[in-house]
Image (cartoon, rainbow, N blue to C red):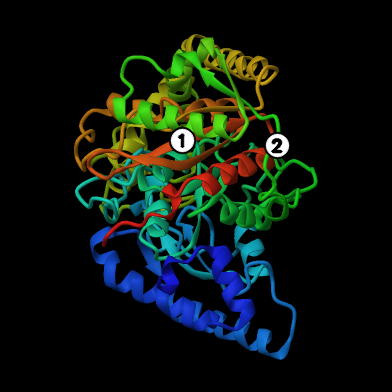
Amino acid sequence: MSLVELTATEMLAGLEAGQFTSVELTQACLAQIQQHDGRIGAFLKVLGDAALERAAEIDARRRRGGPVGRLGGVPVAVKDLLCTRGVTTTCASRMLEGFVPPYNATVIDRLHAADAVIVGKTNLDEFAMGGSTENSAFQKTRNPWDVERTPGGSSGGAAACVAASMAPLSIGTDTGGSIRQPAGLCGVTGLKPTYGRVSRFGLVAFASSLDQIGPLAHTAEDAALLLEVIAGHDPLDSTSVDRPVPAYSQTVRQPLAGLRVGLVREHFAAGLDADVERAVRDAVRVYESLGAKVHEVSLPHSKYCVATYYIIAPCEASSNLARYDGVHYGYRTATDVTAEATDDEGALVAMYRRSRAEALGPEVKRRIMLGTYALSAGYYDAYYLKALKVRRLIRQDFDRAFEQVDLIAGPVTTSCAFKIGEKVDDPLAMYLVDLYTVSANLAGIGGLALPCGYNAQGLPIGLQLQAPPFEEERLLRAAHMFQQATDWHRRRPAL
């Protein structure tokens, strides 16, 4: 097995045993990126020189016997939605092309403190809006298992780079499934933590009450390690919750005795691909073989999840993205708009309008218009307020279900990775890709996706586990139990 195919835990063990250095490891990942990213398109920016310099500094410290952080010398990729001091942060949008933040997101500071080696910024759907990473203003990302198919989104670059062994760990964000869905489609492990578990300071906001940062990795063990590094209270984020961070990396190997697994009646209905249903039910049988008891539960308001999400998320997006007008932030048109300005709006508003029209992509514009309409006078009560009330009912469904079971198991998506362009002209079909994932964001609970099989074409199938708030430890331990009993997570695509 080559260096790049090792898990992060195996890399750390090799580094500590002196089998290889962080420079050698980083060089191997950079070589993998150079060799394959031309076809995959996972990275928007590769930080080759900076990564090697950082790796050399960590190697020197380790040789001297100095203190080395939890990720000492392990390469990590970061979604280009997190601010990185001195490094461009584009959100895959022309609006922020060339933007260089003067500060780091808290997650970036914590990665540095843990001595991670950041190898680059990964591609995404523009401002994290999309389910296929086809909405990036700069490039499409392709699925390493079949380059004619999408990797999912919006953390498509973050998932693809792990699947293609370009980095063993990556940081993604999840607003409606943007970590779990690409993790499922690319055959890696991805965790959306409970809202408030990881600081969102320095994350460019899409929908503030739904966004959450989380890890992607080959295994639950690696995800536990990365979550332990980035989780915890942050006074710079008012939504960050002040609770102790469990030692996820230490407890992840402990099996869960007497585990009660819930299967949601509404998840196995028309529209679910037969291969996906078979793989998920087989995965549940693995848990039964490990001593778990399976119970059927109901989430009766789950049929409203997608509609509720696509009211709340665009409303928050329309508000968050209002700042990008060419004056306060972002791209400004070079066109003289004097002739375009009407008497009613004036030249300033005409400049705003043209700047946003030129710099934002169609999916972002669609969601801004949806959100602005739903928040407008006369429609607020009918749409936004009603959606908030339904959101409460969705959370109550989960609370009742978790009185009966410890975890809910089910599919991540209705099917395996779809072809590039297949859904791009059908926004509703694209939105339904999030059918099984948006509920966790609306309820604010944690969810984890892990590989549980492959279809006849060799495409990965994902299993989703959901747990009550702040039970990431339970999610990770359950996922590790499954990965100890199976080898789906050990498979790598032939590049």
Q: Quadrant of the C terminus?
A: bottom left
Quick check: 404 left or right of 424? Answer: right
Depicted 193 relative to depicted 85: above or below: above
Quick check: 68 left or right of 278? Answer: right
Closest to the observer, 209 or 162? 162
Residue 316 position within the rendered picture, expressed as x and y whole percent measured from the top left:
51, 31
- x 59%, y 43%: residue: 481
Depicted 458 relative to depicted 445: above or below: below
Q: Is residue 183 visible?
A: yes
Closest to the observer, 423 or 28? 28
Where disc 2 sits, the SS reads loop
> Residue 470 has which mark?
2
* Callout 2 amino acid: Phe
State which tag comes first along the sequence, 1 or 2: 1
Q: Is residue 85 visible?
A: no
Residue 57 position within the rendered picture, expressed as x and y whole percent measured from the top left:
60, 85
Q: CA distance from mark 1 to mark 2?
A: 20 Å
- x 54%, y 42%: residue: 482
**Mark 1: few, some, or many residues within 10 Å (few <14, many ≥20)?**
many
